[in-house]
Structure formats: structure tokens, C-alpha cells
Image: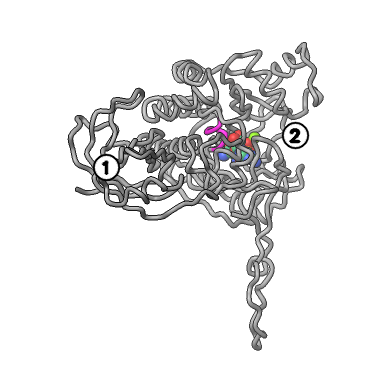
């Protein structure tokens, strides 16, 4: 018999079959007459309980097996007399593939997420992180499916770039690291240091390149890593995160919001229907109201509120805020959460922000002081999506760049898109980790990325 995944063994139609599984022992309980190994292979949260009788030739070794050891188990699936599990595996043969001794850090006790961050190389072997990374993988595939079903072209935008899309000065600079420097021959250029002697950085967003593709393929999206050199010592900022950025030609702000709403609801529905066991785990262990909240969001319709109205609500709020509230100031996380949690009680699009707190590419509204921006705010996380209708009018775009001191030489190619065949277009960026926090209830961005890049985490 070939190896099967433990999730398949546990959902087999009937007992009695002979099968082979491979995985890691989560617990080992051994007595004189019988030993129990709980084996997990990452395919689901549940362990497969393996029952080992002393007539197995290597019973002495198996009974001394340490937590974390890798094993291959051949056995017969049978109905389990124990509560909480349908089947167990009655072992006929156990191969010890890789021993783990008692220095293995993941012994049976509960560990804090903080401690587990220090052993990011081992934490995927815990229940919580197993569930997080299964949901992460499943959502990534669902995201591609959502756009594929709607005819969006998937475009890979560059990681190394000279443009600062958001204009916030948050690019990490690209230079060589430990590059060998042989003596240069005549005529050779020393390329150590900056990227081939050009100042470049790691992209903060693929949007500008995405806009160019939207003006050729109509509807496109990107899905890739983005980098921000902001002081990201908060629970919802990372220096490296993944972003999904759709862009639609011939679309305005409301079409953009409609896509964002469909998208988020689709992803809610996806985890409810496809990640059932993991989602139940999050609901029971991490965030009690999670399932009913996501269920409600999947079948609700999102509120829309003007920035100006949000400021009025915040000014009238009875709670004290740490940061000031004033028309023209950006909203902080505490303000966003107040609006979505206390005023609306669900997801809300905030639209038409003051132009001076938003990026240069956003379309100016007729009032002369706001732009066609939209942020989607959700309870517990705050901003999960940021988007806008883009300024498609060449003169107005150029003028705005001038006002903000943005060098037009560096963006000549972007300006060209407004010269020939310019059209109304709009798009948004969804932070993949913020989405994961929202859908799993995990409260720290470091706990939804396999290997988080934050000021104190870059080693592995
Ligand atoms: O609001 P942002 O900065 O918008 C853009 O980058 C636009 N170019 C998107 C577009 O219109 N195509 O970022 C978009 C989203 C945020 O709403 C947030 O979810 C996430 O990206 N994000 C971060 N996630 C984790 N860590 C950070 N440091 C993040 N910065 C932004
Ligand atoms: Mg934003």
C-alpha cells in the first residue's frame, strides 16, 4: 500500500483497510502492554492515534520514542473505542525515521505565541500554526481562482524598482551584500554597492506597473511580496508582506468598491466552506465569535461612509483617543476601529479622503480638496484594503506631481499612460496578512507569516 495523508485516513469510508502513514509523533504514551503514538503529518489538525502492541519487534524503541520524532507506520484502520476520534491505527510495523530527544522544544505543554516566534523553524508543527498556514495556502489558491473566474490577467510586477509608488519614502535600498571584489580590469565597472550603480529599492506596491497592464488587458491583478521600511513595531505592520492588487480599466470608485466587497465575501465563504476544521479550531481557541462574524459578513452588504462624516463621528465620540482628530488628518488604527466597531458594527468603506493625506495618483474630486480614495475598514483589524480611482487626466496628474515635488523624469513611463488611450480606471490593494488576521482571529501579524520580517526578526 502507498502512503496516504492522515486527513484521508481519518475520513476513510470504512475501517478495516491496511495503510501506511508518515508523520511526526505529537505525543507518545507507553506502558508495558501497549503504547499510543499521536501522529500528525500537517494535513489536518487531528492526529492519528496509533496503537502499538508489544509484539511489534522494535517495541522497546517505539515505547521510548521522543515527541517530535519522524515515523512511518503501517497498520490496520479500525473503529476507535476512545471518545473524540472515529478511527485509530492498529500498528503492524513502525519504522523510526528520525529520532527527537527530550531537548525538542515543543513538548506537550502550551507555549505562548511570543515564545513560538523565537522558534519559527519549529512552530509550523503546532496546532495553531498548522491551521494558520493551511488557511494561508488555501486562501492564496482561492484568490487566484476568484480572479481567474472573472477573467482578470495575473501579472508579475517587479520587486526591484526605482519608483516609490506610495510616495512615503519607505523603500528599502537594494545594494550588494558580500559581493566579491576582484581587482577591476581596464574598462570594467565596479557594480558593488547600489544595484548596478543605480539607486533602487524593494517595491512598496505593484500598482503603477499594474495600471499599465490594465490599459492593455482591461482587468488585471498582482499577488506578490511588498516591502516597507516603516517603523513597523505594531501588531499589524510587517516590513515584508504580501499584497493582492487588482486594477480595472473603465471603472470608477464605486465599481472598485463593488469588486472589493465581492472579493472579501468570496474569501469569507471560501474559508467557511473549505477550511472547516481549522476555522472551528480558531473559533474555539482564538476568537469565540469568529465563525458567526464571518458568516454575517459573507452575507451582508458593506456600508459606505464619507471621510468627512467619519471625522464628525470621531469628534462626537465619548471615548478618548491617543491621536488627534481633525479634518485633514489621517486616521489612526484606534479611529478606524472605532468607526467600524462602534459606529458601523461591520465592514465599512471610507471614501473621499483629503488629498493631502493620500498618494499622488488618486483622482481629484470636483471639490478641490478630496480624492476618490477608499479604505475598507473591518472590526478588530482596521484598514484591510486601500484603493482609489486613479487620476487619468494628464494635466491634473502632472500638476499634482509638481505640487508634491515628485520627479516626473522618473515616472515618464507612467505619464505616458495618460498620453495615449488614457481611460478612467481604479484598483485596490488587499494586505494578505491583514486578511489572514481578520479570518483567523490571530492578533499579531507575526503569527500569520511563516517567517516574519520585522525589526527584530530577520535571521531565518
Ligand atoms: O494602503 P496601501 O499603502 O495602498 C497601496 O499600496 C496601494 N498602491 C494599493 C492599490 O491601490 N493598488 O496598502 C494596501 C494594503 C493596506 O490596506 C494593508 O492591508 C496592507 O496593504 N499593508 C500592510 N500590511 C502589512 N504590513 C504593512 N506594513 C502594510 N502596509 C500596508
Ligand atoms: Mg492605506
Span colored in magenta = 433-437
Q: Residue at x 65, y 85 (%)?
A: 187
Mark drawn on residue 91: 1
Image coords of residue 424 (percent x, y): 54, 35
Q: Earlier in the sequence, mark 1 or mark 2?
A: 1
Numbered-mark total: 2
Q: Residues within 10 Å of mark 1 (few under 14, many from 20)?
A: many
The extreme bottom residue here reads 186
Question: Callout 1: helix, strand or loop?
Answer: strand
Q: Quadrant of the C terminus?
A: bottom right
Pick the front one: 120 or 51 = 51
Left or right side of 404 for 132: left
Left or right side of 332 for 373: left
Mark drawn on residue 356: 2
- How far apart are the two marked residues, 1 and 2, measured between alpha carbons? 68 Å
What secondary structure is the stretch in magenta mostly built from? Answer: helix
Cβ atoms at labels 1 and 2 below 8 Å apart: no
Q: State whether residue 390 appears in this view.
A: no
Amino acid at each position: 500500500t502507498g502512503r496516504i495523508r492522515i486527513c484521508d485516513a481519518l475520513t476513510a469510508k470504512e475501517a478495516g483497510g491496511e495503510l501506511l502513514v508518515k508523520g511526526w509523533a505529537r505525543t507518545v504514551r507507553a506502558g508495558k502492554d501497549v503504547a499510543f503514538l499521536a501522529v500528525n503529518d500537517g494535513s489536518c489538525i487531528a492526529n492519528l492515534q496509533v496503537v502499538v502492541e508489544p509484539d511489534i519487534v522494535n517495541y522497546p524503541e517505539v515505547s521510548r520514542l521522543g515527541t517530535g520524532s519522524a515515523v512511518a507506520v503501517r497498520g490496520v484502520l479500525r473503529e476507535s473505542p476512545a471518545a473524540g476520534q472515529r478511527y485509530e491505527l492498529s500498528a503492524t510495523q513502525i519504522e523510526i525515521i528520525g529520532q527527537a530527544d527530550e531537548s525538542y522544544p515543543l513538548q506537550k505543554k502550551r507555549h505562548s505565541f511570543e515564545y513560538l516566534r523565537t522558534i519559527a523553524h519549529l512552530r509550523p508543527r503546532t496546532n495553531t500554526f498548522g491551521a494558520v498556514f493551511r488557511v494561508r495556502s488555501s486562501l492564496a489558491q482561492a484568490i487566484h481562482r476568484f480572479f481567474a473566474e472573472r477573467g482578470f490577467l495575473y501579472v508579475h510586477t517587479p520587486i526591484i524598482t526605482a519608483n516609490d509608488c506610495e510616495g512615503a519614502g519607505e523603500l528599502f535600498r537594494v545594494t550588494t551584500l558580500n559581493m566579491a571584489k576582484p581587482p577591476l580590469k581596464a574598462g570594467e565597472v565596479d557594480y558593488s554597492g547600489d544595484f548596478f550603480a543605480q539607486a533602487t529599492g524593494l517595491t512598496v506596491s505593484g500598482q503603477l506597473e499594474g495600471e499599465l497592464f490594465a490599459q492593455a488587458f482591461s482587468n488585471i491583478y498582482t499577488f506578490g511580496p511588498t516591502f516597507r521600511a516603516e517603523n513597523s513595531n505594531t501588531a499589524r505592520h510587517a516590513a515584508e508582506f504580501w499584497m493582492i492588487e487588482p486594477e480595472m480599466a473603465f471603472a470608477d470608485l464605486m465599481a472598485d468598491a463593488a469588486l472589493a466587497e465581492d472579493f472579501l465575501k468570496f474569501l469569507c465563504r471560501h474559508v467557511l466552506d473549505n477550511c472547516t476544521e481549522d476555522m472551528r479550531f480558531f473559533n474555539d481557541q482564538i476568537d469565540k465569535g469568529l465563525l458567526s462574524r464571518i458568516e454575517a459578513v459573507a452575507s451582508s452588504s458593506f456600508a459606505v461612509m464619507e471621510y468627512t462624516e467619519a471625522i464628525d463621528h470621531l469628534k462626537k465620540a465619548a471615548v478618548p483617543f491617543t491621536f488627534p482628530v481633525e479634518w485633514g488628518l489621517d486616521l489612526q488604527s484606534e479611529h478606524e476601529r472605532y468607526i467600524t466597531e462602534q459606529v458601523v458594527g461591520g465592514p465599512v468603506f471610507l471614501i473621499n479622503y483629503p488629498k493631502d493625506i493620500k498618494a499622488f495618483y488618486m483622482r481629484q474630486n470636483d471639490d478641490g480638496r478630496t480624492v476618490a480614495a477608499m479604505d475598507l475598514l473591518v472590526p478588530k483589524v482596521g484598514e484591510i484594503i486601500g484603493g482609489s480611482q486613479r487620476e487619468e487626466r494628464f494635466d491634473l496628474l502632472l500638476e499634482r506631481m509638481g505640487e508634491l515635488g515628485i520627479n516626473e523624469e522618473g515616472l515618464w513611463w507612467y505619464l505616458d499612460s495618460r498620453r495615449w488611450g488614457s481611460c478612467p480606471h481604479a484598483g485596490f490593494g488587499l494586505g494578505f496578512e491583514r486578511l489572514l488576521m481578520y479570518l483567523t482571529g490571530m492578533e499579531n501579524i507575526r503569527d500569520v507569516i511563516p517567517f516574519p520580517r520585522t525589526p527584530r526578526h530577520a535571521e531565518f
